[in-house]
Image (cartoon, rainbow, N blue to C red):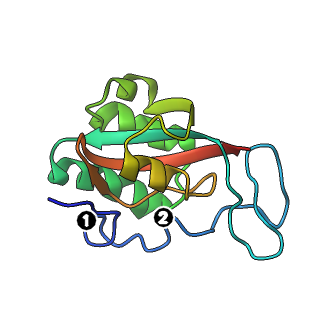
Amino acid sequence: MGKNKGGNAGGGNKNAGKSGGKSGGKKNNNQEESKSDGKLKTCNKVKARHILCEKHSRILEAYNLLTEEHGSSPPSAEFGRVAETYSECSSGKKGGDLGWFPRGKMVGPFQEIAFSLTPGSMSDIFKTTHGYHIVLVEGRKA
């Protein structure tokens, strides 16, 4: 299976990766947004949580639990609870918390998606060589 950044695999979260966070035009240490065009500025580090599953059916179940109640912006605590139950990554024990990581540390599609989301936004389901993922970005640093 090739790279899939959501679309068909995720179950319809068309807002993932788009600016939809709760910025209100304000800028803080964790979120940098250009006031002129609404696009995210380049950042060097992202704080994120994720859920990793080998099977699409399992990640889809986790994704549906999160989106049915919270749409594309679930609270970190709820995402963490779902990660503890569903994630097959060792980070699942910590609620999927990956902490802060720089560009170049994660595999291509994971990095592209994590660095394109606004804080508080969750991705669609996407596939990497490690399996199927959902990412929730909690912060951004220059």
Q: Residue 47: x and y, percent?
A: 59, 38
| Vertical relation: 65 (above or below) 94 | below
**How many discs appear?**
2
Residue 37: horizontal and vertical position, in percent?
Answer: 76, 76
* Mark toward the viewer: 1 or 2: 1
In this picture, residue 72 sits left or right of residue 124? right
Q: What is the crowding at mark 2: few (fewer than 14 residues within 10 Å), some, or many (at least 20)?
A: some
Q: Secondary structure at mark 2?
A: loop
Give coordinates of residue 117: x percent, y percent: 56, 57
- Element type at marker 1? loop
* Residue drawn at the location 17% of the way across and 42% of the way down: 54
Residue at x 63%, y 68% (from the top left corner): 19
Residue on which disc 2 sits: 71
Query: Which residue occupies the foreground of this view, 73 or 107?
Result: 107
The answer for how far apart the CA atoms under marks 1 and 2 are is 16 Å
Residue 118 x, y percent position in the rendering? 62, 57
Q: Quadrant of the C terminus?
A: top right
Q: Is residue 113 above or below residue 138?
A: below
User: In the picture provided, is 132 more to the left or to the right than 40?
Assistant: left
User: Could you tell me the amino acid type at mark 1?
Assistant: Ala
- Report if residue 99 is visible in the image: yes
Please give the residue where the numbered disc 1 appears in the rendered image. 9
Instruction: Please say if 81 is above or below 23.
Output: above
Looking at the image, residue 18 sits to the left or right of residue 79; the answer is right
Q: Residues within 10 Å of mark 1 (few under 14, many from 20)?
A: some
Tell which of 76 and 124 is nearer to you: 124
- In the image, what residue type sits under mark 2? Gly
Q: Earlier in the sequence, mark 1 or mark 2?
A: 1
Q: At 31% across and 34% down in the image, what residue appears? A: 85
Q: Tell me whether the residue at label 1 lies in contact with that at label 2, contact meaning CB atoms closer than 8 angstroms.
A: no
| Mark seen at residue 99 | none
